[in-house]
Amino acid sequence: MTRGDVLHVWLHGEHVAKIERLHSGCLRLRFTPETLGRWGVGTRLLSYSLPLTTRQA
């Protein structure tokens, strides 16, 4: 990934999130509203260390 790139995350055919590289070089993971609605905040869908959250970093 280069700066400004977006990687879409799919799970079992469903678009669940996107990973963005910020201009600072940091990565940001954002879950889709549909994923949050279906699975609920706090669910550990992709990884135990990455629970679903609405937090905007």
Image (cartoon, rainbow, N blue to C red):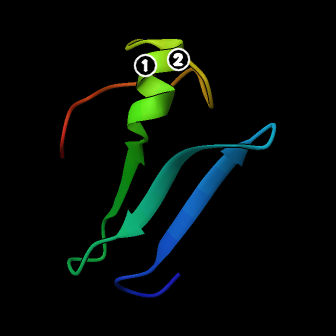
- Taking 30 as reference, is 4 above or below it? below
Q: Secondary structure at mark 2?
A: helix
Determine whether 42 is above or below 9 in the image: above
> Relative to the observer, which residue lies in front, 51 or 39?
39
Residue sitting at x 26%, y 29% = 54
| Image location (x, y in percent) of residue 49 | 50, 26
- Which residue is at a point 46% across and 87% down the rendered structure image? 2
> Number of labelled discs?
2
Q: Say what amino acid the circle numbered 1 marks.
A: Gly
User: Residue 7: x and y, percent?
Assistant: 55, 67
Q: Position of residue 1 (x, y in %)?
A: 53, 81
Binning the other alpha carbons within 10 Å of mark 2 as few (below 14), some (14 to 19) or many (20 upward) gives few
Query: Can the viewer see residue 50 in this picture?
Result: no
Q: CA distance from mark 2 to mark 1?
A: 4 Å
Query: In this rendering, does residue 52 appear at all?
Result: yes
Residue 37 is marked as: 1
Contact between labelled residues 1 and 2, with CB atoms less than 8 Å apart: yes
Image point (43%, 39%), residue name: 31
Label for residue 50?
A: none
* Residue kind at label 2, given as amino acid type: Arg
Mark 1 burial class by Cα count in 10 Å: few <14, some 14-19, many 20+:
few
The residue that disc 2 covers is: 38
Give coordinates of residue 14: x percent, y percent: 69, 40
Q: Is residue 52 left or right of residue 23?
A: right
**Residue at (43%, 19%) from the top-left corner?**
37
Taking 41 as reference, is 2 left or right? right
